[in-house]
Each structure stands twice: as C-alpha cells, then as structure tokens.
Image (cartoon, rainbow, N blue to C red):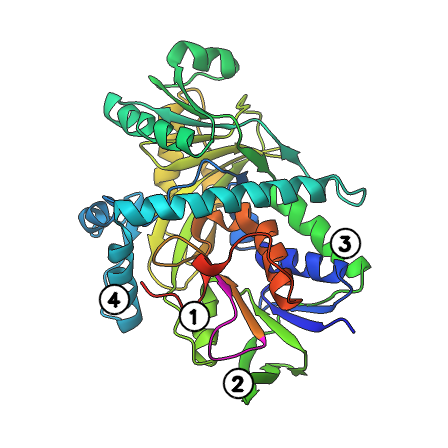
Amino acid sequence: MQKKVTIIGGGIIGLSTAYFLQKEGCEVTVVDSSNMDSGASYTNAGYVCPSHFIPLAAPGVVRNGLRWMLDSCSPLYIKPRLNRDFLKWVWAFNSSAMSSRVQKNAIHLRDFTLFSQELFQNIKNEAQFSFHYDRKGLLMLCQTAHQLEKELAICPLADALNIHAEEISSAELKIMEPDIEINSIGGVYFKDDHHSTPADFMNQMKAYLKSKGVQILINETVVDFKIKNSKIEYLITDKQTLISDEFVMASGSWSAHLSNKLGLKLLLQAGKGYSINTQRSTGIRIPTILAEAKTAVTPMDGFTRFAGTMEIAGINHEINRNRVKVIANAVSDYYPSLQLTDIEIQAATCGLRPLSPDGLPFIGKPESCENITISTGHAMLGWTLGPGTGKLVSELILNKKTSLDCSAYHPNRRF
C-alpha cells in the first residue's frame, strides 16, 4: 500500500517532492500559507548552475560580512541583533568557512547540482511540460583586474571537479553578446550551466500535480503537530487537521520555527534577495553575473530579470529601496546603454532563501521524529536543487536506496 504524505511548503522543493511521490502512487497533499504565486521560487534568477559549487560559507565571507554590516547597500548585509538563534548561526557559519570544509562541501554540491540538472531536463522532456529551459551557460563579468583574478582562481577548482570554465576576453564578449554594449574587461564562462523561467515551471507543475490528484491547499498555515511516541499523528493548521503516514518539512525560512515544535533545533536564517524585471528587449543573450556587484542577469521567457543582494535580517518581506537601487545602478554600470525605468524599479519583488550555516541543505529524518523528512536550507541553490531534492526525499520516504549519499545533509549534523 502506498503512503499518504503531507508536504508543508509549496515552493519548488515542495512541488518537486510531490511530483516524484505521486509518480510512485502516493496520495499527496501540499499545504502552504501563501497564495503560491510569489516568494523565492518565483523571484529567483532561474539558474540551474553546477558552477555554484562554492557554498556561501567560504573563507573571507565573514570578514566582508563584518565590514559590510553597517552598510545597508552592501552585497551581503547582515543586520546585527542580539538573538540567540542568530548568534548561534553566525558562530556555526564562521566555523564552516574554512578551506578544508569548503572543498569537501564543493564535491557534495557538484554532485547534487548535476543530479538535479539532469532531472530538470527529464521533467522538461515529458509531454505535459513546455516551460522555458535553456542551455546557454553562465558568464561572470568583471570590471577590475582584481575581481578577474579572483574569478580566474576558481577555474582550477572547477576543472578539478570536471566543471568546464574558461577565461573570456573583452573581444570575445563582443562576439558572445553582440547586441548590447558591455562595460567589462573580461570574465569567466561556465558552459555547462542552464537557466529557466521560474514562474513557467511553477505554474505548469501546479497544474500537472492537480491533474494527477495532488491536493494543494493555499492560504493555510500549519500551527502545530500532535506527536505521540516520536511520531506525528496529525498536523494542525489554522483551518483543519491533516492526518498522514509521512510528512515533509519544505517550508523554507519558516522551517526553523516549525521544527522547534518537533524538538529539532535547525540553525537557519532567512536571506532576502531582490529582483527587477524589464519587458523591454535588452539584447542580452547569456545569463550573467556582474561579479563586483553580485548581481544576476537572466534572459527569461519574454523578459529579462536582474536579481541580487543577500540581506540577513530576519523573516520579513519589506522592500529595502536602497538595495533595489543598487541592483538598478549595477545594470547601467555594466550595460551603459540600458537604464531601468522608475516603474520597473518600483515593481521590484523579493524572496527569502533559507540559509544553513555550512551552505548545504538539511535533508533527512530528524532523530526526534520518525515520520517527517526535513527538506530546507538550500540557500541560493533552492532552484537548482529543487528536482534533485524532491527525488531524494521521495526515496527516503519510500525507504529506497537514495540516488546520492544524503549523510552530509542530515538535519542533526554538527557544526
């Protein structure tokens, strides 16, 4: 008999999990506190990127974070606050930002991103899906020799992981991007990266799941669990109780609060990112990161998206206009012929990315509860790792051998 599963969270992680579970014949319910049409799964840059094998917790990040702490316009803004969970996270983040741990975690992220990238393509090839998905690689554009040197230093690491990376001169940039003026001395090109349009995927996946009998409950908040003998008997929402054999915690930055009710202390912080869209033709063909500005540029399905910044300031959806302006200024700095309009800038959106201290997600069953699987903490790789995470979680729930070794992602791991 196949299992009845309730998934808390309707972002890409939750929907991908529902996708693989329903294929195994499970009866699946997805419950989400939002309308499921906004947030990080809709506002992200759409990258499916093996090039992002270096976790956020890397040498030098803590030093820069402290230097930028009082600058609300910095690429990484950490709002200082006397909060026990926040301070524990900062301590664990600092402990994880060591070269030896970064190199070890890079291997995990390489394997995970490639696995998930393959699953993205498999889903795309199904007849029911027509979402935008492209394979144009990723450019890292630099304006200074210092930044270019930093980006080139990553190339040998990428090569050791069998991830193709090559230096691109300013002359070569003109050939690759002939339709727009670029203010850059050169950069690095990762040819194996892919990109997509998030809303296309999310809307088609929701429609597909509904057609397969998956129940999707929107605007419904999980408030508590009824636990007996280390198992959840049912969960309680603000509207009803839901009984299942298995549960999945895929509620992103809100997972730490809910996990506390299960006796699990997840070290998790919300990292806010912003995005601006323009429907005008920009001439940009290849997904690009403006290296000094830490801004992502993505040619999507009918529009171009500019996204960036990392703001660690608790769970909120307040739009910091200064940080949005930083993204807009970066666009005109790197692309002198492109100016975002006031209307485009005012329409900026944001999303919260759940950050673990070591840059690896939390995936697995916690020691305190045997019938829930934790699935959160993906940081900037939530989109990239969505299908891969859904597959691994489905395998864990159905007691199958997992496609990847999940031990590095265990929610009870020490930092």
The secondary structure type at the circle numbered 4 is helix
Secondary structure under tag 2 reads loop
Query: Which amino acid type corresponds to the residue marked 3 in the rendered image?
Result: Tyr
Q: Are marks 3 and 2 in contact (CB under 8 Å)?
A: no
Q: CA distance from mark 3 to mark 4?
A: 42 Å
Residue 402 located left or right of residue 54: right
Look at 38% across and 52% down and name the residue there. Answer: 359
Say what amino acid the circle numbered 2 marks: Ser
Q: Which residue is mark 2?
A: 230
What's under tag 4, amino acid-wise?
A: Leu
Q: Are marks 4 and 1 in contact (CB under 8 Å)?
A: no
Q: Which residue in the protein does label 3 denote?
A: 208
- Return the residue at label 4: 87
The residues colored magenta run 362-371
Residue 323 point in image, percent of width and height:
35, 45
The residue at which mark 1 appears reads as 256
Which residue is situated farthest in the bottom direction here?
A: 228
Lower sequence index among marks 4 and 1: 4
Q: Indicate which label's residue lies in the foreground, 1 or 2.
A: 2
Q: Residues within 10 Å of mark 3 (few under 14, many from 20)?
A: some
Disc 4 versus disc 1: distance between alpha carbons?
15 Å
Residue at mark 2 to residue at mark 4: CA–CA distance: 29 Å
